[in-house]
Amino acid sequence: MKFCSACGHAVEQRVPDGDHQPRAVCPACSAVHYVNPKMVVGCIPEAPNGRILMCKRDIWPRIGKWTVPAGYLEMGETTAEGAARETFEESQAAVTMGRLVAIMDIPRVDQVYILYHGTLAADAHFGPTPESSEVCLMREEDIPWREIAFPTIDIALRAFFEDRRQGVARVHHEVIRLPAR
Ligand code: ZN
């Protein structure tokens, strides 16, 4: 940030009184502009026959790679609402959000992933969107593991399938250590 979003004055990087690290501080209106990690919300949408709705990305980054629906949480949304919205935007599918499957911290890219289990109706509509060139239901054995867009999605999907085999419903917490940007 170079300019104050409240008044337009150039900001300074300094440690505000009582704080412990540098922030963008406006010398004109005294606003302190905090920058915090982003939340990525999504779900593992499961059809009654056990197949998972997968999306082939048609947007940057990882164009052409596969993922479950997920994206940035918007202001004013709950995480489950955001996951449902992202699922609709990426796959045209309406899902009923269920239990929490995974929380994943990725401190190197300042993101936190929250993934739910989503339930698809047997006759659920889905299809390609501006964000996904292909949307399809896949059996576990058909998941293109070497073509998964993000490590978070790979980890969450593997954990989900393992839990499903064992008949348990765990919430997974992972810290993903990526190389520095
Ligand atoms: Zn200002």
Image (cartoon, helix red, strand yellow):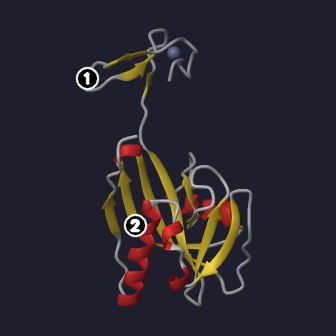
Q: Is residue 100 visible?
A: no
Q: Tell me which label, 2 or 1, sits earlier in the chain.
A: 1
Residue 157 in sight in this render = yes
Residue on which disc 1 sits: 18
Tell me which residue sits at (65%, 83%) in the image: 121
Spatial separation of the CA atoms under disc 2 and disc 1: 35 Å
Residue pictured at 41% horizontal, 85% vertical: 164
Which circle marks residue 102 in the picture?
Answer: 2
Q: Amino acid at mark 2?
A: Ala
Q: Within 10 angstroms of label 1, few (less than 14), some, or many (20 or more) residues? A: few
What residue type is disc 1 on?
Gly
Residue 80 at x, y = what percent?
53, 63
Q: Residue furthest front?
A: 146
Could you tell me residue 152's position as x and y percent?
A: 43, 61
Circle 1 SS class: loop
Pick whichever, 41 or 99, lies toward us.
Answer: 41
Write the residue at 49% across / 69% down.
Answer: 146
**Closer to the camera, 50 or 59?**
59
Residue 11 position in % (x across, y down): 47, 15
